[in-house]
Image (cartoon, coloured by chain):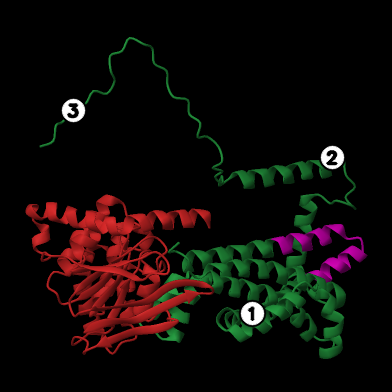
Amino acid sequence: MLDRAPQDAKDQSAEATRPVAFRGAGFTPSGSRHAGWIALALVIAVWQLAGSAGWVNPLFLPAPSAIAVAITKLAMSGALWQHLSWSIMRIGAGWIIGTAAGIIVGFAIGLSTMARGVGITFISALFPIPKIALLPLLILWLGIGEEPKIATIALGVFFSTAISVYSGVDAVPRNLIRMAQSFNVPFHAIVRRVIWPGALPSILAGFRITASVALLLVVSAEMIGAQYGIGAFVLQAGNLMQTDQLLAGVVILSLFGLVVGKLINLLETRLLHWR
Amino acid sequence: MDLIADHISHRFGALDVLDGVSFTVRAGEIVAIVGPSGCGKSTLLSILGGLLRPAAGGAELRGAAPAGSLNPLTFVFQDFALLPWNTVEENVAFPLLHTSLSAGERRAVIDDALRRTGLTDFRAAYPKQLSGGMRQRVGIARALAVRPAILLMDEPLSALDSQTRELLMEDFVRLLADGAMGAVYVTHNLEEAVRLADRVVVLSRRPGRIREIVTIPMTRAERGTADARGPMAALQSELWSLIRKEAIDAEREVQHA
């Protein structure tokens, strides 16, 4: 039999009470939805004010309105689409080739002892090389067409992808693999149903990095040897001191990066909804 | 189907973990394995289930698996080992995807396993949405779906709070009551061992050797009665007296490692 005690919330002592001080504040930063946009708008407003008031020389820093006009003119003339389409073609081809090769090699390193022994040594030796430094060599090998530019991007994407894939495979909890083995699930099914989804967060994080690498390399490659492309356009504008057009190119690159980032966010939301 | 541990020895590098462990789990029997920390209980279970190759000796099966058994030796894991990207239903279906069952048979098996573990209403939930106890129920449902002859349970309740442990222990007693399935139950908890097992294998500290095999002198049904509390507590106390000194030594060894 339970002996129940009375439920008295507070005893009737005459001594004064005081609240316990709260000490748990801070260390929990949360993102504000609008703060970033407001800050960006403020910076643009101040920049515009500085330009309109003549505080800065428009040759060195054109006002945002001048950049907007330059973008509009570029769009109306069709030049924007011409440059952008070349850049997108190079990025797309290089990224797809580099990503496909990186995923294959990354999985091989993650799953095979022999591939790991050989692959990690090569990747460790070659990954630190700035890939743009290989462009002249690639031009010698592949000619002066699109191939060396695409190959440069593919190389840059390949190494980061391979590293993120084998890191992702390594990070798949071993207990899940053992569980699948304990049910006699075949090797290919373990790879498809356990290792691939388990490595996906790392692979998608790698996509975010390789998208930036591809953008960086396409601009560099186009600055070295291309007639069309955002990189070539920015370089030509710089050479002609057309800073409004130069910054228009930079803004387009920034917007392109934002769009790619949003696409990867969408992919993550769709594929990693279980997290 | 019997499962035989035949002079199993194992070492990790220079560390001897198991030394000549032999015993037999007879069809429908529940054998608990207890012993001090680090005595090789989980290693022994991995060897019995074919997930680890022993340095010497081995695990053997005797007799045919029950009709319809898709995976005679089936694990229930301490950390549940659920696929977080799959729903409850998909987790239970996972071991059935590469079997010869038709889609209709598979559905019937999944429905039955979910019903027996009280998960029917949670079939569309993801593991992160479930409590620890419910996650372990999914692990049990997944194990039941392949109709095992022997369940290999590696401290299946140790990651759970005491109330959930109590509820799941009642489920184990119910699920194993008909004697259709045997089990090897690795645990630190002597109360669980006495409550569930027909025999308790007591291992010594590392390298694990069989110190004693204790038979529980009551049927599983008798253990649920109020009259059994006293004798069960006495058995628990007897098992503890077998382990206590070595558990203290093992703990000091771990602390000094």
The residue range painted magenta reads A230-254
Crowd rating for badge 2 (residues with CA inside 10 Å; few <14, some 14–19, many 20+): few
Residue A31 locus on image (x, y percent): 56, 46
Chain identity of mark 2 = A
Given the image, on which type of amino acid does mark 2 rest?
Ala
Identify the residue shown where x is 68% and y is 45%.
A41
Q: Is residue B97 visible?
A: yes
Q: Which residue is mark 2?
A: A53
Chain identity of mark 3 = A
| Chain identity for the colour green used in the image | A
Q: Are marks 2 and 1 in contact (CB under 8 Å)?
A: no
Q: Is residue A245 magenta?
A: yes
Q: Is residue B214 magenta?
A: no
Q: Residue A154, relative to residue A205: is it above or below?
A: below
Q: Which one is in front in this view, the residue at disc 3 or the one at disc 2?
A: 3
Identify the residue shown where x is 29% and y is 20%.
A10
Colour in which the image shows chain B? red
* Relative to B85, B146 lies left or right: left
Q: Which is more N-terminal, label 3 or label 1? A: 3
State whether discs 1 and 3 lie on one chain.
yes
* Relative to A186, B188 lies left or right: left
- 3D distance between C-alphas at marks 2 and 1: 52 Å
Q: Residue B254, relative to residue B6: is it above or below?
A: above
Q: Is residue A79 visible?
A: no
Residue A218 vs residue B124, the one in the foreground: B124
Chain identity of mark 1 = A
* Relative to B107, B210 lies left or right: right
Q: Which residue is mark 1?
A: A102
Given the image, on which type of amino acid does mark 3 rest?
Ala
